[in-house]
Image: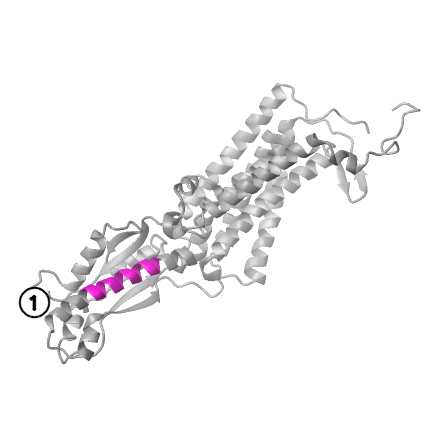
Amino acid sequence: MTADATPPGTGPQVRATTLLRRPKLWLMPTILTGLLALLLSLLYMGGIVNPQRDLHHLPIALVNADKGKPLPGQKQNLGAQIGAAITADTAGDEAQWRTLTRAQAQEELDSGKVYGALVIPSDFTDSVAALTTTKATERPVMTVLTNPGKGSLGSSLASKITTTAAQQASLTIGKQLTAAAAKADSTQKLLLADPVAVTTQVGHPLGNHSGLGLSAFYYTLLLVLAGFLGASVISNGVDTALGYADNEIGPWHTRRPTVPINRTRTLLLKMGMTAGITILSVSLVMLACVSILGMDATHIPLLWIYSYCAALAVGLGVQAINAAFGGIGQLVSMFVFIVLGLPSSGATVPLQAVPGFYRFLSHFEPMRQLSDGARAILYFDARGDAGLTRAWIMIAIGAVIGLLFGFAMTVYYDRKGHKRLTPQPA
């Protein structure tokens, strides 16, 4: 700066009203803000606006334990008839019925592979037959089992489907009974018309501090946010400390001398700090959720290690994207890890109840992989087949992709001589 130069900020000031009349100043913020609002609305609401319409092949167990003899004139007992009718129903494809034994169904409930079950008891045919005699003591019962570990909405959808199937079976049996008991009085006919009672039980119970099956989703969201926000703060902090970004807090503005360092070494520094600081952030997340708020959680050491690796994978991905895309990196990261991740996670709305676009995203979107692992640890005894094995694999793949992509881009920029800023004097 020369001696007679006007110091910055001391010359004539431009009026805000003057700038507001410049169309070019409005153009880009208006376009970007409008696009963001439109995309966020379509992506978020598109995944949950009509789950009943989009519902396809929700896995539900069908247990036929009926051992009774067929009624007169029939080749199969009532349990076999009901099972055949339910599995052969092609009018709708809402459910994917899996014919299992009672033990197999419980195994599927405990591993989160089915959203519910319909159980026909061993004495079902005998109990129905007894309704037409003086030996009748109570209505036969079919049991609907729910699985709240798959989320409150998923469990509710499964419960609705199984209850409807049981009620339809009761009405079908009722028509057979009333036709065969023409001499029955009005009270008996009322009983025979709808002879089966349907009860609902929890097939895989959760603790009272599990958010009705939603604590795994919100815990996963915390891990993603911890990784995303932590990496963003670290990236901005490092750039400010190295003199590649201004530091402005309220009315105070500072600019540090620029440290001569290339993009690759800067990314290495940011990723190293991310690995270290994530230890603290994950520990505080667990302290708040488990110790202070009392969230139901077992396998605490495993949960901590998993949480750290999950948040770190997100953080490394954010650093890689920031290094590759520069100023818009945080916006790109937000779409990759949050905007596209939430509706395709399958944690609040089952993947079987979202449009195909979100089911496609769920194969690789990070939040789906992380929520499956968290759900397995919190609800399904940390079983690998409940989603934990896949989650570990996808965390490893995601971390490797983040490292390779980030360093590939920074090495390329460095070799091309793309410097970030002209060094500033001390």
Give 259 or 198, whichever is nearer the viewer: 198
**Residue 398 location (% of width, % of height):** 49, 37
Q: Is residue 390 above or below residue 118?
A: above
Residue drawn at point x = 61 percent, y = 49 percent: 281
Give 300 or 112, whichever is nearer the viewer: 112
Residue furthest to the front in view is 21
Q: In terms of image quadrants, where is residue 391? A: top left
CA neighbours of label 1 inside 10 A, class few (<14), some (14 to 19), many (20+):
few
Q: Is residue 408 above or below residue 116?
A: above
Residue furthest to the left in view is 73
Give 266 or 221, whichever is nearer the viewer: 221
Residue drawn at point x = 20 percent, y = 58 percent: 83
Q: Is residue 135 above or below residue 170?
A: below
Which quadrant of the rendered structure holds the N terminus?
top right
Residue drawn at point x = 57 percent, y = 33 percent: 321
**Residue 94 location (% of width, % of height):** 31, 51
Residue 235 visible somewhere in the drawing? yes
Is residue 80 in the magenta section? Answer: no
Q: Is residue 119 above or below residue 334?
A: below
Task: Name the residue tied to disc 1.
Answer: 72
Secondary structure mostly seen in magenta is helix
Residue 271 visible somewhere in the drawing? no
Is residue 162 in the magenta section? Answer: yes
Residue drawn at point x = 27 percent, y = 53 percent: 97
Q: Which residues are magenta?
A: 158-172
| 81 with respect to 390 (left or right) | left
